[in-house]
Amino acid sequence: MTSEMIGYCGYNCHLCAARSDDIALRGKMVDGWKKYFGLANYTAENVKCDGCLSDGVVADKVCQARPCAKEKGVKNCVYCDEFPCDKMKHLISGREGMLVYCYPKTTTITEEEYNLCMRQFNSMPNLLRMLVESGKMPPWVGNPGEAD
């Protein structure tokens, strides 16, 4: 889980415990997914994932963004002319949105739980950065907090 891997949808695959060989760590992550997101179909065994940019095993078997991006040959959905499409819109998320969306379950979330169970889905900063890099958004957008 060390080298950076940003998924086609902007997820931080490199931060995801699903890429770990440690089954206990994956189990803790899955427990958090059940607690905060209600995702009951994942187990420590079936969540093992090589990251969506790899040609290996992926945890999300129903993802439509990955096969579409691979077929189109784009390094990220942002670079597709159809961005944001219905295949990936529901995958766009930010830290604040996840914490509020999962409220009141998140009132007692620890930083460790957030880092293990949610942080990998904080795609908004990656997507905004790539939109700026691709020239699809103005440069000031890449400076979060400055326009608040």
Image (tube, grey):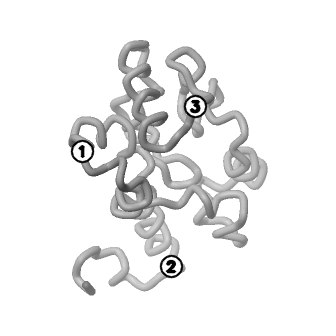
C-alpha distance separating marks 2 and 1: 40 Å
Chain-order first, disc 2 or disc 1: 1
With 66 as the anchor, is 98 left or right in this view? Answer: left
What is the x, y in percent for residue 118?
A: 39, 44
For the N terminus, the image quarter is top left
Residue that appears at 41% across and 67% down: 129
- In the foreground, 93 or 134: 93
Say which residue label 2 marks. Answer: 135
With 30 as the anchor, is 116 left or right in this view? Answer: left
Disc 1 on helix, strand or loop? helix
Front tag of 2 and 1: 1
- The kind of residue on which mark 2 rests is Gly
Disc 3 on helix, strand or loop? loop
- Tell me if label 3 and label 2 are in contact, CB under 8 Å: no
- The kind of residue on which mark 3 rests is Ala
Say which residue label 3 marks. Answer: 40
